[in-house]
Image (cartoon, helix red, strand yellow):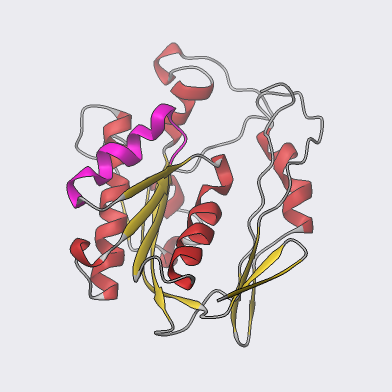
Amino acid sequence: MTERIGKTIFLKSKPSIIGYGSIVGKKEHEGPLSNEFDEYIEDSYFGEDSYEKAESKLQKNAVETALKRAGLQSDDIDNIFAGDLLNQCISSSFGLRDFQIPFIGLYGACSTMALSTALAALFVNCSVSKHTVAVTSSHFCSAERQFRFPLGYGNQRTPTAQWTVTGSGALVLGKGESKPYINAISFGAIQDLGITDANNMGAAMAPDDVKIRPYPTHEGMVFFYTQIPYLRGF
């Protein structure tokens, strides 16, 4: 069911993306991709009493939208691959627990969506699962508290500081049902680019993103995954 050439694994059954869902925050909604998202929120708390709970709700809504598009229920899903930026993947764990889908928690930082999709596709391709879900999320406010300073601290942001996305995206994958489908995946080696500025995560990721990138073809989607460390010594 698979063929490997170098670092690339070719998926002969071409797992299809049969459902998708997305939800973002106010800032993302106001950007150039606004029309591509299914839903957006104005309130960073999303009606909850913490940013972490809001992020969990983002994941839940994204998965519900993806399942609805696929015409499936949670009972139809064999495995869910999910991750976020927080300790113990708490946004994923608490956001997805009510679905009662066998859960594989992942932490790939900014590569988590690619990582979850690649593994979900492999499970479908090898007939381990009939349907899988890949989902990830981040939230600017919870990420600031996790990696830098809580917003209430009022710390001044440096000129190189990145703005973490508030949002979540989910995919439902099945075997050979429709396009787009995933032809191949590559798991990249870790690259240490020597970045030591804790605020400049973009500089650590940008060079590798140029070398290895997803691109569509007339036959489907070739999906690449790469993982690199943000900072030397982390």
The residue depicted at 76 percent of the width and 50 percent of the height is 208
Q: Is residue 9 left or right of residue 29?
A: right
- Left or right: 107 with respect to 80? right
Identity of the residue drawn at 42% across and 67% down = 35
- Numbered label tally: 0
**Which quadrant of the structure image shows residue 52?**
top left
Residue 9 point in image, percent of width and height: 65, 67
| Residue 73 figure quarter | bottom left
Is residue 88 visible in the rendered image? The answer is yes
Quarter occupied by the C terminus: top right
Residue 115 lies, in percent from the top left, at 54, 53
Q: Is residue 43 visible?
A: no
The location of residue 17, given as percent across then percent down, is 43, 73
The quarter of the rendered structure image containing the N terminus is bottom right
Vertical position of residue 39 compared to residue 2: above or below: above
Q: Is 92 covered by the magenta stretch?
A: yes
99 or 20, which is in the foreground?
99
The residue sitting at the top extreme is 153
Q: Residue at x 39, y 15 (%)?
A: 152
- In front of the other: 106 or 13: 13
Residue 157 within the segment the image draws in magenta = no
Which one is nearer the viewer's eye here, 166 or 74?
Answer: 74
Instruction: Please tell me whether the stretch drawn in magenta is mainly helix, strand or loop.
Output: helix
Q: Which residues are magenta?
A: 84-99
In this rendering, is residue 34 above or below 163? below
